[in-house]
Image (spheres, grey):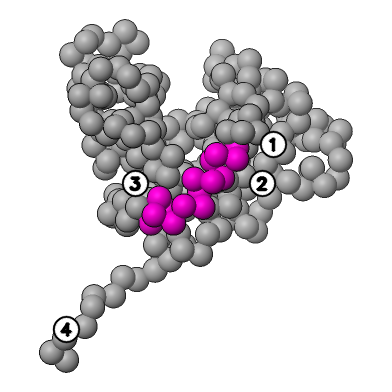
Amino acid sequence: MLGLVLSEWNSASLAPLRGLLPAADRLDPTTFSPEEIRALQRRFGVHGPQPRLAQLFTHGVDQLTPVRNHALTQLQDLQPVIQQVSRRSGINPMLLTAILFDELQHAKPGEGLPIAAHSGLFSTLGPAQLGVSEMVKQGLLPENPSADQVAEAREQLLDPERNVALLAGKLSRLLQLLELDPSATNNVSGQRSHAKTVATLAYLHNGKLDYPARILRYMQDPELHGLVFGQRKKPLSALI
């Protein structure tokens, strides 16, 4: 049933609904019709935008240079695995990087500590903020995992490289259910349909209606572009 619902939710079937929207909204890939939102709320638990106060707090955190720089440093270390899973999955590395950048900036204090992770205090873990339930959906765990299996899954979620691979797995799983090809995540600046695909994936990943706009904005961030596609040069020796 889940696959059927998602397979029906594609660009062609949504075209009549988008025709009811104002022209400006139809051009905005982050705009979802009321019918789309209700369907996603009902089937996948996603919901509306954060409360205004929470949005202001999120925006404030995004402006903190030390927080941004710390996230960029972590992303730099993760670039080899991001590039690897991007090549393997076909998913745009900028999409992976944008999601990771946002999640790293808003990481909760202490969630990376094994003792906190295994206490069950946090439902999502690691750079991409994934839960044990996602590993179940990817077929990596049974429907009712044992305590030992949950403990091992949490260890995997805490491992940054494994976590990035699981994020790519999640996006691949959603793309398959939506009957869309990974290549539809590539040209977000040149094709609106690709931008809509990315917005939908971001919405399904995070569950907040204001999240897709942040991800698309990060995908155009010059510093993140340089991190993903730029060449790192070794510093010249002081003897030269």
Q: What's the residue type where badge 2 is placed?
A: Ser
Region of the chain picked out in magenta, as a range: 55-69
Task: Find the distance from the CA under tag 4 to the CA under tag 2.
Answer: 48 Å
Question: Residue 225, position in %: x, y?
Answer: 46, 62
User: Label 1 near label 2: C-beta < 8 Å?
Assistant: yes
Instruction: Quote the CA–CA distance across marks 1 and 4.
Output: 54 Å
- Residue under the image location 23 percent in, 20 percent down: 118
1 and 4 marks in contact (CB < 8 Å)? no
* Mark whose residue sits in front, 4 or 3: 4
Label 4 vs 2, first from the N-terminus: 2
Q: SS at mark 3?
A: helix
Q: Is residue 24 left or right of residue 98?
A: right
Q: Position of residue 83 (x, y in %)?
A: 34, 54
Looking at the rendered structure, the secondary structure element under dot 1 is helix
Give the numbered dot on residue 85.
Answer: 3
How far across and down, in percent of the image, does residue 12 sit?
A: 72, 35
Of helix, strand and loop, which one carries label 2?
helix
Mark sitting on residue 11? 1
Q: CA distance from mark 2 to mark 1?
A: 8 Å
Q: Crowding at label 4, few (<14), some or many (≥20) Cα neighbours within 10 Å?
A: few
Residue drawn at point x = 80 percent, y = 30 percent: 17
Amino acid type at image mark 3:
Val
Q: Nearer the viewer, mark 4 or mark 2?
A: 4
The amino acid at mark 4 is: Ser
Disc with the residue nearer the chain's start (3 vs 1): 1
Residue reaching furthest to the bottom: 240
Quarter placement of the C terminus = bottom left
Q: Earlier in the sequence, mark 4 or mark 3?
A: 3
Q: Going 62% across and 24% down the picture, which residue do you hit?
A: 47
The prevailing secondary structure element of the residues shown in magenta is helix
